[in-house]
Image (cartoon, coloured by chain):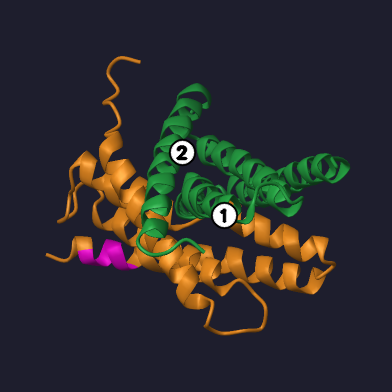
Amino acid sequence: MTGASPIPYLPVALGSAIGAVARYAVSLAMLSGPGSGLPWGTFAVNVAGSFLIGFLAALMAGGGRFHASDARRQFLLAGFCGGFTTFSIFSLELLFFIVQDAYLSAFVYLGLSIPAWLLAVAIGYGAGERLSRRA
Amino acid sequence: MIAFPLDIAIVALGGALGGVGRVWLSERVTRRLGDRFPWGTLVVNVSGAAAIGLIAGWLHGGGGHAGEEAVLRLALIAGFVGSYTTVSSFSLQTHALIRAGDWRAAGANVVASVGLSLAAAAAGFLLVSRLAGGAP
């Protein structure tokens, strides 16, 4: 399509690589973390990544103090935040609970995750907005 | 286990490719279906869930030797598919729908994303573990 600016794929690739490695590091660190059987590593990256993308998107919105280039936005948002968070591993973890008849765990994991992600993105967005507007 | 720093390199490479695949496909879908509803992220997340189901089913069914399995786990699950799918964009787009007052679309996005991803992961997992289980 003409007119649409091409997506800068190099920043996306770089940001996603760093995001994926950061997620991997958190998952390794969480192996010795809190127990209770829920996948806290995935939970933590998805909540933190939701907060971060809300914060950055609001911070770098047009008209604010921190307007960023397209490449920088793609690096941080689609790249780092996208690579850091994961819906597929979340789905697989949910599936494993169900396959093992651990319906309560599946229910708790799902019931904690979705509200936590949405709350995190709202808090991040609000913080980014306030910082962006401050004169 | 794959030792440091090779594990990091494998996850980084898979993650870079997954991220580029996500943005490329999401952009294609958005151009075709418009951006009033986050179809791009939905398609990416559901297809990624199917893929992770296939991979996990294959590993579960005993596919590959131990060494191969460790590499595939890092490259495909932690790296490629992990990075290909995204919760952050899902959250940001759902939040945007809520801010716009479109609660129906926001709710539909949550239900469709979770329901279809779970179904896709289950379909992929069952398909391959059945096939692998039937093999000698």
The residue that mark 1 highlights is B67
Q: Is mark 1 on a helix, strand or loop?
A: helix
In reply to whether residue A84 is colored magenta, the answer given is no
Residue B109 in view here: yes
Eyeballing the image, is B50 above or below A32?
above
Chain B: drawing colour: green
**Is residue A122 in sight in this rendering?**
no
Residue A76 placement, left or right of A92: left
- Chain of residue at mark 1: B
Q: Where is residue B50 in the image (x, y as percent from the top left)?
A: 67, 42
Mark 2, residue position = B22
How packed is label 1: few (under 14 Cα within 10 Å), some, or many (20 or more)?
few
Q: Which residue lies furthest to the right in this view?
A: B134
Q: Position of residue B70 (x, y in %)?
A: 56, 56
Sequence-first tag of 1 and 2: 2
Residue A80, given in percent of the width and then of the height, sits at 34, 53
